[in-house]
Image: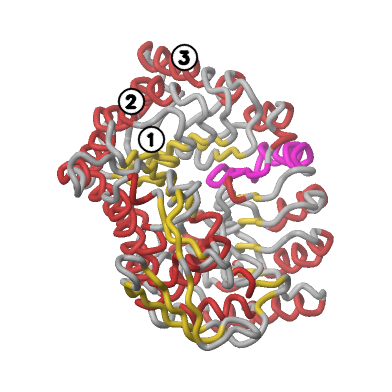
Amino acid sequence: MHTLVFLSTRQVLQCQPAACQALPLLPRELFPLLFKVAFMDKKTVVLRELVHTWPFPLLSFQQLLQECAHCSRALLQERPSTESMQAVILGLTARLHTPETEAGTQPLCRYGFIWGALRPGGWRGSPMRFQASARAQGGNRPVVSVSGWLGVGVGSCLLLQPTRAPRKHALRVLDMTGLLDDGVEQDPGTMSMWDCTAAVARTCIAQQQGGTAEPGLAPVPVEVRVDLRVNRASYAFLREALRSSVGSPLRLCCRDLRAEDLPMRNTVALLQLLDAGCLRRVDLRFNNLGLRGLSVIIPHVARFQHLASLRLHYVHGDSRQPSVDGEDNFRYFLAQMGRFTCLRELSMGSSLLSGRLDQLLSTLQSPLESLELAFCALLPEDLRFLAQSPHAVRLKKLDLSGNDLSGSQLEPFQVLLQAAAATLLHLELTECQLADTQLLATLPVLTRCTSLRYLGLYGNPLSLAGLKELLRDSVVQAELRTVVHPFPVDCYEGLPWPPPASVLLEASINEEKFARVEAELHQLLLASGRAHVLWTTDIYGRLAADYFSL
């Protein structure tokens, strides 16, 4: 849905040179919508000029590219256009090379006729179209001629007397965080988070090496907030960028850091360069750190007192090691975890915590709202402790994927669900060996999670009958929007029983049988008035919610 204001703004930007000339005449209240339209339509010339002349102290992607009253399209849920991102960075570069004395002034319309064309509820009259030009009159005195139509009663030509006045606000913070980063193969015309990191890093290095355009005049300092992605190939480049931003007019601030397959010493070196006041999340993946590596890195992470999310994926920490060194490393790791005061999300995927979950969670100073313990070989006593802990009643997101819940773990898992029922929004149970018997026994407590929005059951040996029972019983869960379910065992040929998760993931299915299953599930959803609920087997889509978006 687009309002008349949006359509008028889009029309204004059709001729980019004229639109750039007219920017000083437009009320600054229009700049947010101008930015969204220019970003959406890849009006790169205007976009660059908007960033260069931005009249507010903050330019935030999360504020400007979300759904708004004039346009229902949420650009943050799409991969950003490479052209638009490059235009923003070029505008930032131009801003950095603009002296403070120039950046602080802009021509202002003395008579304010443009503001008079804005009325509550939208534009009045024809869509806004104009051409702007400047000429000298009476010496060096500038006069701007604007011709066209802007609301009712505006003549075809009007002379304005511009003045130069100090701008009350100038861009000080460019917040580029919140861009889509789903890991799915991208369109070549869009920019991934890896590319965005490289582009911003390149700008930092170039700024340090190139200096200001006009020696003797101080550039306008700008803080750039970004989510950074780094691996072995990009480490040296990003480290140089972070070093270059120290004392530079362009100050790089990392909100979320994700490091993949990075050696321990490089991870530590990078953490030492980050601003402790900015970092919100540390996400370490595929690093094979083990407990020894974690004990080296964790004190450098613990200095970030405002850290809200710590994600340690596939670091292969095994707390069950019988060695003295392993036990010492685990105790040191626990002591450092106790330093976090703002932690709300913890992910320890593939860290073997059998019988040690109580030690880990007891060290934390405040309850967690998101806990991911995928493939952690949890025991019944681990689940019992979690169910009775202060974390259970605060959980919004819980991931127990890869833990066998089919035997003695089932009862404590049900107790845990009961404890979290009032707050749980996102539940991931991929590859938990849940067959129809376990699912049906769990449904009474599962359906008490009335706020649940997402349920992940992929890789479990469920039949069509079990899925239909889940679909019928979940009618009481009004907030449920997504169910990622497995291919029913009915659709396989010659499955061993119980089928290992590896067989369910790799064996071929009968496509005709599955097509009939999909049709039947869809008809049941329609009959219950829930066509808006997505039932899918797609585990690679953009379905799982990030904790900060819950």
Q: Which mark is residue 250?
A: none
Extreme residue in the left direction: 209
| Cβ atoms under marks 2 and 1 closer than 8 Å | yes
Compared across the picture, whether 367 is left or right of 494 comes to: right
- Residue at the (61%, 57%) spot, across then down: 457
* Mark 3 / mark 2, whichever is N-terminal: 2
The amino acid pointed to by label 1 is Val
Q: Mark 3 sits on what residue?
A: 331
Q: Mark 1 sits on what residue?
A: 315
* Mark 3 / mark 1, whichever is N-terminal: 1
- Tell me where residue 251 appears, x and y as whole percent: 34, 38
Residue 181 appears in the picture as rendered: no
- Residue at the (64%, 45%) spot, across then down: 406
The amino acid pointed to by label 3 is Arg
Q: Give the number of marks.
A: 3
Residue placed most toward the observer, 165 or 222: 165
What is the basis of the colouring in this image?
secondary structure
- Tell me where residue 384 appears, x and y as whole percent: 70, 29
| Cβ atoms under marks 3 and 1 closer than 8 Å | no
Range shown magenta: 396-420
Secondary structure of the residue carrying tag 1 is loop
Marks 2/1: CA distance? 9 Å
Marks 3/1: CA distance? 17 Å
The amino acid pointed to by label 2 is Gly
- Residue at the (40%, 20%) spot, across then down: 299
In this view, 78 is above or below 352: below
Q: Mark 2 sits on what residue?
A: 293
In this view, 474 is above or below 301: below
Q: Residues within 10 Å of mark 3 (few under 14, many from 20)?
A: some
- Tell me where residue 438 appears, x and y as whole percent: 71, 51
